[in-house]
Image (cartoon, coloured by chain):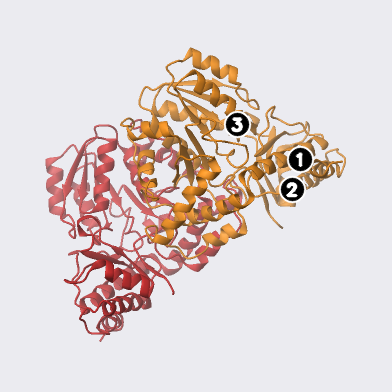
Chain colours: A orange, B red
């Protein structure tokens, strides 16, 4: 049975990327590798829309989040975090561990924080040193308006703006420099169409100044100061995950070839088609501000998750993501982040139809895939 | 020109390992991946000669060293480190950053600490909570007698024994349980014949108890407590470097097939042949306790490193490692760690001969490769 992945990380890896990584290993101090890393550094600036350094860390996206917190702040620094799902919650965990002074704003799952509410929070906490946001909250498939949120912070305070862009970079329009963001993190296994193992962190000029003067929290492997120092020489402080960096080079060539604006539009269209396909099958959407990376869907009443998932996975080879925490067994999440095209949306919605039929759910066969076709081709 | 790597990490990756990693990516919560991780966990126990957990971290070997220090100790804990090269020095850096109380013993490069000296250090520092050792010091190609050193610690104190086994595991005889070691770290790109990106950390029972009760140093991504908790369910706390774990599974099957004792013997023999080849070319060996992973050689008088290296690399496709720090341009290091066999030693010594000839060094052509043949086949 053919297997197809529709999960928000790992996401499918293109064949040419896999083949580049399968070539004989080279040494990370060889000129050949340093040339690759130099190009990767340039192409990451293109991806993040920045002239500032984007460092490559050999760790997961969470490692990149920790690196940011422990490199920018010190014990006692007040940092505002927004918890609207599992990954916003992680910002809070990290701040509590490393500074011990977290103002955590809770937002209902499926919603995003509004700029007005953030403005209030900043008024209540004028001493906040940072604001941690999530662009696309993977656990809820919900996107926040980072442009507006960042503007509020920049207008009202000197707090740094940290953005978890892990499932947003490459899916949602994003301008690191123009939007005044200080830190943005993504992971290799998301919009970048790579296996997991690398975190990429863009760092603004004022964040660099703070990091370079930093003497706060004990850190070593995840030090952005070390990473920045090496980055200046197109190097890394520790042995990098060489084969993954080489794959990233290949993936970034694909990003350049397609064009970042086209990639954003593609994701917006894929997400819309996915939502319309689900709607046409009588399934309700979970988020009131849906991400372009992952579409969360309520399981219709009477539909049991494990039976439905078994029908999807074991009979149709399709893996989607389950709901998390309180929404386990209540929602599921269809990802279209990275290496997906319009025909792939027919596949996943067609697969949902096949699984619904398998578990005897009542719906009109073909309605989902027709809606997908109409979403792309018009009616 | 064919390119051949004789560096102590990255080391060559076998074709079947590269191909396994080039297969379509799978999700880390899929049963298929969890089955692989379960097998990897078992096979790592075999590799380290332990019944205790060996956790897989997605980071470099240094990340594994940091994880050990920050997970075991707290601010103020006195830890003895041995600095006999760049990687012993790293133990000291980490201890100073995370506990602030380091007793660092300096040993001349090319030598290893003697058990008697460690006994004295322990007598002088009865309050030491840990002793950090390096099994094979990569920068100097020098091996320490971990069995004897660990015995001294266990007989004289309650200090934990931490071993950087990064270039030793898979090259030198090592028995985690029988030798009473508490922590041993290796990296994927060393004896395990993999690209870089994973650290493997074996953890003794008493170290686990300390880690699980640990409330000391702020940490998150590199927490061994989190890693142990996930390990118990054959899982990882954060998205692992999936393709590298799959490659590791393949590499560990090769380790099982060859047998760990045979692998140790192979490395001992490769190292001996390499040393005898160099001797026969009139080159002096650097270490008085040579590692089986990497052979450090003095550059003969009158031989200029950059010209010699250029002849090796550009004319013969062979990459060896330069000397580091004070020994830059004075020594070079030939690695035979991981995926090497006896004929490979003919290649590297033959390559050295070709490069020596290229730079008009006076030696007997064929003497090196003859010595290699005799080392393996007898005279």
* Image side of residue A252 versus residue B100, left or right: right
Pick the residue in front: A21 or B201: A21
The x and y percentages for residue B205 are: 35, 44
* Image side of residue A84 versus residue B184, left or right: right
Q: Is residue B232 visible?
A: no
Residue A342's label in the rendered image is 2
Task: Write down the residue under mark 3.
Answer: A325
Distance from disc 3 to disc 2, alpha carbons, whole Å, reads 31 Å
* Mark 1 neighbour density, 10 Å: few (under 14) some (14–19) many (20 or more): many
Residue visible at 68% across and 41% down? A265
The x and y percentages for residue B229 are: 46, 39
Residue visible at 51% across and 22% down? A153
Q: Is residue A149 visible?
A: yes
Task: Write down the residue under mark 1.
Answer: A273
Mark 1 or mark 2, earlier in chain: 1
Determine the secondary structure under disc 1: helix
Q: Is residue A238 above or below residue B259?
A: above
């Amino acid at each position: 049975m053919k297997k197809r992945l529709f999960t928000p990380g790992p996401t499918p890896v293109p064949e040419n990327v896999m083949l580049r990584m399968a070539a004989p290993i080279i040494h990370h101090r060889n000129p050949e590798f340093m040339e690759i890393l130099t190009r990767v550094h340039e192409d990451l600036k293109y991806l993040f829309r920045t002239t500032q350094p984007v460092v490559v860390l050999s760790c997961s996206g969470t490692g990149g989040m920790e690196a940011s917190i422990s490199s920018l702040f010190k014990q006692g620094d007040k940092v505002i975090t927004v918890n609207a799902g599992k990954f916003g919650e992680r910002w809070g965990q990290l701040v509590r561990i490393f500074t011990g002074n977290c103002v955590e704003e809770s937002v209902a799952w499926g919603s995003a924080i509004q700029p007005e509410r953030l403005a209030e929070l900043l008024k209540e906490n004028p001493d906040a040193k940072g604001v941690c946001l999530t662009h696309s909250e993977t656990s809820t498939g919900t996107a926040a308006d980072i442009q507006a949120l960042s503007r509020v912070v920049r207008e009202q305070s000197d707090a740094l703006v940290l953005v978890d862009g892990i499932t947003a970079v490459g899916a949602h329009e994003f301008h690191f420099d123009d939007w005044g963001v200080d830190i943005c993190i993504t992971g290799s296994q998301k919009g970048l169409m790579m296996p997991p193992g690398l975190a990429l962190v863009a760092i603004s000029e004022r964040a660099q100044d703070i990091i370079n003067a930093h003497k706060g929290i004990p850190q070593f492997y995840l030090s952005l100061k070390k990473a920045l120092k090496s980055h200046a020489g197109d190097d890394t402080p520790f042995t990098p995950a060489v084969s993954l960096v080489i794959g990233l080079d290949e993936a970034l060539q694909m990003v350049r070839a397609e064009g970042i604006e086209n990639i954003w539009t593609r994701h917006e269209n894929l997400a819309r088609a996915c939502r319309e396909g689900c709607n046409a099958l009588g399934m309700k959407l979970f988020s009131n501000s849906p991400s372009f990376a992952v579409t969360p869907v309520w399981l219709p009443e009477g539909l049991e998750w494990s039976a439905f998932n078994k029908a999807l996975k074991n009979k149709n080879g399709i893996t989607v993501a389950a709901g998390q925490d309180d929404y386990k067994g209540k929602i599921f999440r269809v990802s279209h982040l990275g290496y997906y095209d319009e025909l792939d949306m027919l596949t996943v919605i067609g697969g949902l139809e096949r699984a619904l039929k398998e578990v005897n759910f009542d719906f009109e066969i073909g309605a989902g895939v027709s809606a997908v076709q109409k979403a792309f081709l018009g009616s």
